[in-house]
Every structure is written in structure tokens, then in C-alpha cells.
Amino acid sequence: MLILGIETSCDETSVALVEDGRRVRANHIASQTGLHAPYGGVVPELASRAHIQRLVPMVDECLREAGLRLADLDALAVTLGPGLVGALLIGVETAKGLAFASGKPLIPVHHIAAHLYSPFVCGDGASYRMISVGDENVPDTETREQGRTGEGDAPLPAPPLRFPYLGLVVSGGHTSLVRVNAPDSFGLIGETVDDAAGEAFDKLAKLLNLGYPGGPVVDRVARGGDRARFAMPRPMLRGGNPDFSFSGLKTAALKVAREFGPEKLAAEPQLVADICASFQEAVVEVLLKKAGAALEANGLHELAIVGGVACNSRLREAVTEYLPGVHVVFPSPILCTDNAAMIAGLAFHRRERYTSCDLTLNAEAGLPLNF
Ligand code: KG4
Ligand code: ZN
């Protein structure tokens, strides 16, 4: 069963083709990072406009490269929420138009549920296209093209996780611990009471003038830093509370930055590296120790770490230190950040509930997980 997925919940426009919920035939992503960087964060109106400009040509291109037409699809899938409502709307209305015109079912998908499903998606050998979207005066650049290679029809690897498992979602907008009972059935265990983990990285980078988005740059700078130089708090680690809080960490980093002042920070790259490494270690330790406690408290044995922050190199490495002996799965980095392959993948498991195109579907910024 071949599903075309569409994702536009934030600042990535993505279109993907996925077969039977796991095999990626194509995954095209246009990242707007360069467009929003001058503003230090996502500007919703710019995001919506860029989605409008890119989405339909990307659907065309994705199908054309795969040698397919809309008529060859079994269904379409789209992110219904959560996210920026104006950005979501572009995806939802476009998907409705395409599904209605072609007479195909349209399957709405929850963005976070799709992140939780992303470890099951296989496609490192599929057709990836990464496009970097600039502003109106700068033409788009293609930053990576792998072409259609490898995998083809080779057997897929066995599923990497058994249900139920624990999902740790760490993205720019969400930080939560979720019991995943089945591909499309969830129980929320804990979540952040203030900032998301990715947001904390982005704010630290802003504070240290490292640019946007913060996660990847903090990750890179921290590699040369001393993780133990600055004592950063480990918020809400004790007492068995499964919720997270990251806003205090930001305040602690601000205090350190103020203590040294902007001149010293600008003149001493080692100081900046040490702040990044100490901050990152606090985030990583809290995430992994809380995941460990939640595994135990809920009688679960396997953990999936998903979302943009799951790209973090220290988080990936620290698993063996903080969670020795636990089966932990990270999706490949291209499937950690926002992508439509995870949307089309999860849609396969919802196909029986959505057998037509419901034109009343509407984007929902605060869509609940089990909708
Ligand atoms: O999942 P995602 O692409 O979008 C949302 O749904 O939010 O996550 C984006 C977030 C950003 O906050 C970004 O700074 C963070 O993921 N991120 C990272 C890394 N790569 C991306 N955070 C830490 N280390 C990284 N290597
Ligand atoms: Zn996301």
C-alpha cells in the first residue's frame, strides 16, 4: 500500500512516499531554517508563505521522480496538528484538494504520534532531497541529494522495538514521555511544564550569539568543552515526578554568561564551549535519567528517543552511561527532524479508520495525541 505524506506543521515542507508503513520510496524536505535565521526563530507568516510556494511543486517532483501519478497512490496522509495553525492549514487544504481530485482517502496524522513511530521507518537508501529555502532574493539551494539507491526491494530489517515501549519525544515544541501501546495508541506519562528541550538549546544559542537553530550549533561547540566546568541544575530530577522543566536551566546559563560579560564571551571560545557542554550535559542527564525512571515505574523495557533533539551527539553517546543495558533506539537523523516519511508511515496504521476524503478536516494547533 503506497501512501503519499505531507508535513507542514512548522518550518519544514516535506513530501514523502512510503510503502506499507515502513519502506520509504522518497522523502523530500525543504527546510526554511535559512529563511527564519535572521529573526532568531520561526516567523509564522513567512513559514506559511514558503509552504504555499513549495508544497505543490514538491508533490509533483516527488511523484515524477518515482515515476508515479496521483492515480497510482492508495491514499494521502497529512499532519493535522499540533503545530503552527497557519502552517498546518497549507498542508491540510492542499492534501484535501489532492485527495478530493483524485478520489483517494485522506488520512490525518498527529505530528508527535508520527515522531513516536519514526524508528519503524526505513529508508536510508531511498530518494532524499534536502532543499534549503532562503528569502525571496536568494534562490533555493539543494544541499543534499542521495538519489534512488540501494534498498530497492531488499527485505526490510525486523522492527526495532516491541510494543509497548517508552517514547521520549524531544523536539523544538515538545518534551514528553509516552507509553506507546501500539503504532497508534498512546498514554502520556509526563511532559515539560515550561520550555521544550529543543527550545532550551535554541535559547542558549541565542544567549551566546551562536545563531539559529541552536541545537545543532550547541552540539558542535560543546564537543570541545568541559562538561563539568559549570554546575548547572538538574531540574525536577528527584521525587519520581515524570514531568520536565527547562526554564531554570536557561536562567542558570544566563547567570554564568552575565558573570563573564559579552567581551569575555566573544574573546574566549573555550569559555563558550564549556558553557555549552555543561548546559548540554544537564539536559542530557535529566532526559535520560527521567526516561530510566519512567521505564521502571511503568514496567517498560525498551526506549525510543525521537524528535529533532534526538540528533544530539552527546544524547546518543550518553545512553550507555545513564541507561546501561536498556534497549534504546534512535531513528536516523533525517527521520528525527520533521519529515513526511513518518507521517505517511504512521498513516498506514490508520488506514481502516479513514477510507475516504473528509472535506471537513481542519488543522488543529493543539490536537490531542489520541484523536
Ligand atoms: O522535531 P523538530 O525538527 O521540530 C519540531 O517538531 O519542533 O525539532 C527541532 C528542534 C530544534 O529546537 C533544534 O534546535 C533541535 O531540534 N535540534 C537539536 C539538534 N538538532 C536539532 N538539539 C540538540 N542537538 C542537536 N544536534
Ligand atoms: Zn517535529
Image: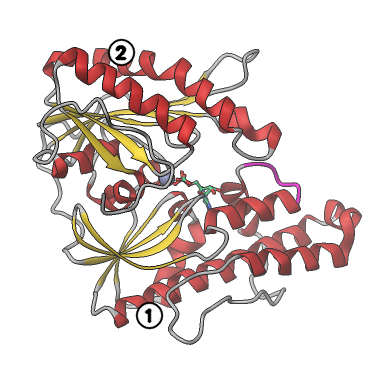
263 in magenta: no
- Separation of residues labelled 1 and 2 (CA atoms): 46 Å
Give the image location of residue 345, x and y in percent: 22, 40
Main SS of residues in magenta: loop
Q: Look at mark 1 in the image and give the residue it sits on.
A: 293
Q: State left or right for residue 72 relative to residue 112.
A: left
Q: Which residue bears the numbered disc 2?
A: 60
From this viewpoint, is residue 12 visible?
Answer: no
Tell me the magenta residue range. Answer: 208-212
Q: Secondary structure at mark 1?
A: helix
At label 1, which amino acid type do we have? Ala
In this view, 94 is above or below 194: above
Give the residue displayed 65% in from the left and 34% down from the top. Answer: 37
| Residue 108 coordinates in the image, percent (x, y) | 25, 37
Mark 1 closeness class: few <14, some 14–19, many ≥20 residues within 10 Å: some
The residue under label 2 is which amino acid type? Asp
Neighbour class for label 2 at 10 Å: few (<14), some, many (≥20)? some
Q: Quadrant of the N terminus?
A: top left
Asked where in the image residue 261 lies, by quadrant, the reply is bottom right
Quadrant of the image where one finds ligand 2: top left
Mark closest to the chain's N terminus, 1 or 2 = 2
Given residues 51 and 170, the one toward you in this image is: 51
Residue 58 against residue 307 in the figure, above or below: above
Q: How is the image coloured?
A: secondary structure
